[in-house]
Image (cartoon, rainbow, N blue to C red):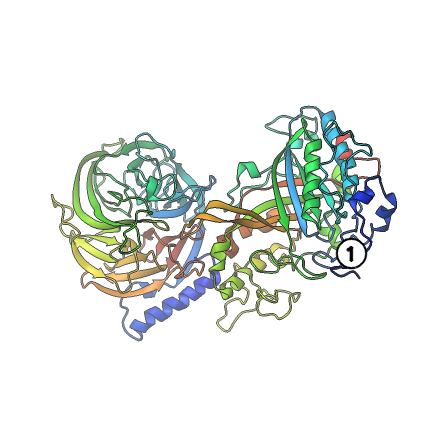
Amino acid sequence: MRSVKSFSELAAAAIASLAIASAAHAAPQGYLETIHKHSTLGSTVTENGDLNPYAVVVAPVSAGKILKDDVLVDNFNNISNLQGTGATIVDYNPTTRQTKLFAQVPQKLAQCPGGVGLSTAMTMLKSGWIIVGSTPSTDGTTATKGDGCVLVLDPNGKLVATWSGPTINDPWGNMAVIDNGATATLFISMAGFGIPGPDVTDPATGYPVIVRKATVLRLELSIPDGKPPALLSQTVVGDGFAQRADRDNFLFGPTGLALGKDGALYVTDGLDNVITAIPDAVTRTASAGTGRVVTQGSLLAWPLAMAWTPEGHLLVCNGKNGQLVEVDPASGKQIYAQWIDSDQAQSPPGNGDLFGLAMTPDGTGFYYVEDDVNTLVKASR
Amino acid sequence: MSGPGDEGPVASRRALLGGAAGLIGAAGAAAVSNAPARAATPKSQIEPFWGPNQAGIVTPAQTHSYFAAFDLATTKREDVVALLRAWTDAAAKLTAGQGLEAQTADPAAPGADSGETLGLPPSRLTLTFGFGAGLFTKDGADRYGLAKLRPEALIDLPRFNGDQLIVERTGGDLSVQACADDPQVAFHAVRQLSRLADGVAHIRWAQPGFIGGYGAGETPRNLMGFKDGTMNPLISDPKLMKQFVWVGDDGGWMRGGSYLIARPIRIALEHWDRMKVSFQEQTFGRQKASGAALGKTHEFEALDLDAVDKDGNPVVPENAHARLGAPATNDGAQVLRRSYSYDNGLSFVAERWPPWRQGMEFDAGLLFLCYQRDPRTGFVKIFENMAKFDMLNQFATHIGGGLFACPGGAAKGEFIGQRLLLTA
């Protein structure tokens, strides 16, 4: 929690020790050791009380109310604190340092089964359209979850299209995107298939039952000039990912997506504590299952959103302990971790606080959210 | 000096039913003590009702409170006048330990007093009345021709970060703070006032509260286990009260009054109880046992906000509750806190932090009450920053409340708010 400055400094100390332990007097091994500053940029709570910030997206262009390099953050909860009920997106401008409400979607939408609870699946296209997933509930648990939908907003925050159907079930994790302007390809994890409520437990473990029906869906879009994106085709490129309900974290399922230059789509799955790679994700016509294991366990602790460093490493948010893990996907080596949220109000410190992650446009730092104190934070050199 | 158990001559309500004026004067002294908290006083003591300031503000805190807000239903100013006159008369009797029953009650009619304080001592009952914005304008309507007299300081409170105000527990056109050393006496008083308001105003929300039976001069502990109120301005210092609490001569009808912020703050006690004591102390910026600031030994030693440890980190963390609330952090701003813990049993709660626990939890916390000369330079100034950055916000949620202009006190024959209601 970066708003607690003394904790920032504690975290900085933790960073140093973690980094130096493996990198003492050696050439830089990765990106995280260059990151030393963490600054709270502002609150992400909206006037209507929405909270629990999830997705972090940096605007690629100026359009409508949005200026290039603005940071968009959506909220998963409304003022009731129940997960899967948030319906707002805020816009932080790095120049003015002001955070404004960008969009407020109706919480009940006939076209969006179950309503609206904005998830980490969000992007802004070069054409100015904002696409965001809904993973809704009415009681804050998957017992009342709906299938949700994918929402399309114009750059003034107006809802212009809603996509739902049998392939769309709780669009959940951060998107991977290829944006060619007039066409675009989105990868979205669908984490909701077949998840019961958190009270349906497995007698063997005592935890909610695990199902393995989650998918990663590829969506091909055409974006006619001046018109909203149209959904051309959908392909399930990965399936069989582990999921289960969780009273604290709403659900576990495939979450972080990152598309490599090699055409592989990297996927985090918190329950199996793993990063896998789906080969030829852009071109494949059938599912690769869960793909090839890149790395598992060790520093990973419920990995969530991912982002690429300029050097081609993956930064991975840990859900369980507020740490950010740097992974070299080529070798599968976990380089080190930095404790970017060490709030002791959770156990272990930072547990449940991280989610969305996005690199700054110049690559010298990254933005992330802290769900414990509802803030947007910038990490920099 | 009286200690606990030294009740002195007991003035029971039964004895006072016919009017026992002699006792009133005798027990009316010593309303102000040096103690930052309540003084250990006999329950027989009567807090004087009449005077230039309302009682219950710089009165040493009683052990119990019952706070209530009312909405006015009438459209006629004379009804409001009649209500305030009736409340004033009733308050004078109730605080003096008398009931509202007529000397010869009619057994064929409902009693004028519900009767549950018969036999109980006055218990230092105070009744403090306030006016919400709705007395002046409501939904754009100037119901009583008072809109032009709404003081600038009676602002619409801004929304603070983290506020989760429940409409049914927020606002109100009139407020009543009843405080007594006996919970039944405090509740009884509001119950009678509510009944007197029948047809003119209806009760909107209410919150009982309590303070543990700490000795004289001891700062009470809140439900988080920490001393609460150490940095309060001394109620025994009239200069400080004039500076921070009482509206001055430039206040028009509010002179001699004070602005009350009342906010029920739910505390996630289950979450708090899981925290390491050292983290709790970092959160408050104080040591749990002694109440001393971090880095200090004694409770009343001044905070050293500049002290740093060997690594250069502040000894009192940047976002510690005590630092953010300190006058030095707020350009000298101070309010007089007069809060009570509350316990409403259990309720279904969804917490607003990871791990997003939900279930039956203690519906308990703090009824935060503070008085000030002007909320813009008091609570609003101090809390604006705290609402965003106080570490304590991870355990505390403001769920209701309001701002009330508590006018000056009444002289015998007057009623509370007369200067407002009869001069407009």
Instruction: Say if residue B413 shows up in the picture.
Output: yes
Q: Position of residue A290 (x, y in %)?
A: 17, 52
Q: Position of residue B8 (x, y in %)?
A: 81, 56
Q: Position of residue A258 (x, y in %)?
A: 23, 51
Q: Residue furthest bottom?
A: A25
Q: Position of residue B394 (x, y in %)?
A: 48, 53
> In which quadrant of the rendered image does the C terminus of chain B lie?
top right
Please state the total of marks drawn on the protein image: 1
> In which quadrant of the rendered image does the N terminus of chain B lie?
bottom right
Q: Amino acid at mark 1?
A: Glu
Residue placed most toward the observer, B75 or B39: B39
Tell me what residue is drawn at x 76 percent, y 61 percent: B3
In the visual, does B20 lie left or right of A84? right
Q: Quadrant of residue B2?
A: bottom right
Q: Quadrant of residue A135?
A: top left
Residue placed most toward the observer, B404 or A246: A246
Q: Residue furthest top?
A: B76
- For disc 1, the neighbor class at 10 Å (few under 14, some 14 to 19, many from 20) is some
Tell me what residue is drawn at x 64 percent, y 48 percent: B369
Q: Please determine whether, in this image, residue B298 is positioned above or below residue A202.
A: below
Q: Residue furthest left?
A: A285
Residue placed most toward the observer, B362 or B54: B362
Instruction: Say if residue A261 shows up in the picture.
Output: no
Disc 1: which chain?
B
Residue designated by label 1: B7
Tell me what residue is drawn at x 24 percent, y 32 percent: A225
